Image (tube, grey):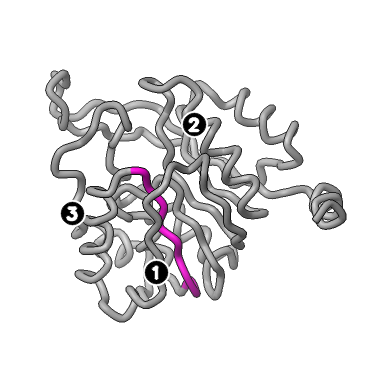
Amino acid sequence: MVKSKSGLAIQLSKLRTFEKPKMELEQYPTESEIAAEILWFAGMNSDISGKVIVDLGCGTGVLGIGALLLGAEKVVFVDIDADALKICRENLILVDKELAEKAEFVNKDVKDFDFKADLVIQNPPFGTKQKHADVIFLETAMKTAPVIYSFHKLETRQFIDDYAARNGFKATHFWTFDWPLKMALAFHRKRIERIKVGCWRLERLKSDARSLQKSI
């Protein structure tokens, strides 16, 4: 386990990212310091240690591996891209072979994923290539866990807030970041372009949780 936010960021910065990003999947890496900022808060907020966590659209594993480094009981890494999952698995072994025993890797489209966990952490596609791709991730996340940390373009803030409310969730915390998109695809012209991104901590309302239990 790491003992500081800066130590976590350093560990995450050593991980391999996408070798050949797939444009249709919007494969942009999660910057290590941003990941550390959110994960450290989640850890201090008792959302990680001893919890079963799902990293939806895990890519090369930055968020899920960070959760394991902060004491998660288990992390399920889910991605439609088998190549990304391979790098994710290699990253985890690189960080700590023993932590690999606490991981499960699922090569599946998130809309077909069915699992119950304590927490979902996700950096979904922003929906620029596949319209509403981010909504599919949110829908699955809300079926999976009562607490969600999710990154989305800042301009969608009102939509995300309204969508959460309609589905029995509330935003308890919110962060904004200048998200660095590093040159990775052929159409990129700038070495680094920064876009405004928000991160939501969403929590299922207790009344909705009781309704969910009755329906099971």
Residue type, numbered disc 3: Arg
Question: Would residue 117 be found to the left or right of residue 97 on screen?
Answer: right
Nearest to the observer: residue 34 or residue 202: 202
Give the labeled residue for mark 3.
16
C-alpha distance separating marks 1 and 2: 24 Å
Secondary structure, mark 1, is strand
Check whether the beta carbons of the residues at disc 1 and disc 3 lie within 8 A of each other.
Answer: no
- Badge 3 crowding class, 10 Å Cα cut-off, few under 14, some 14 to 19, many 20 or more, is some
Q: Quadrant of residue 105?
A: bottom left
Residue type, numbered disc 1: Ala
Q: Which of the image's four quarters has the N terminus?
A: bottom left
Give the labeled residue for mark 1.
103
Secondary structure, mark 3, is loop
Residue 51: horizontal and vertical position, in percent?
56, 70
Say if the magenta span includes residue 79: yes
Residue 211: horizontal and vertical position, in percent?
85, 50
Residue 44: horizontal and vertical position, in percent?
54, 66
Q: Quadrant of residue 170?
A: top right
Q: Nearer the viewer, mark 1 or mark 3?
A: 1
Number of numbered callouts drawn: 3
Secondary structure, mark 2, is helix
Mark found first going from the N terminus, 1 or 3? 3
Q: Which mark is residue 56?
A: none
Magenta region's main secondary structure?
Answer: strand
- Residue that appears at 32% across and 32% down: 25
C-alpha distance separating marks 1 and 3: 18 Å
Residue 55: horizontal and vertical position, in percent?
45, 54
Which residues, given as a range, are shown in magenta? 72-80
Say if the magenta span includes residue 31: no
Give the labeled residue for mark 2.
134
- Badge 1 crowding class, 10 Å Cα cut-off, few under 14, some 14 to 19, many 20 or more, is many
Question: Would residue 18 be found to the left or right of residue 3 on screen?
Answer: left
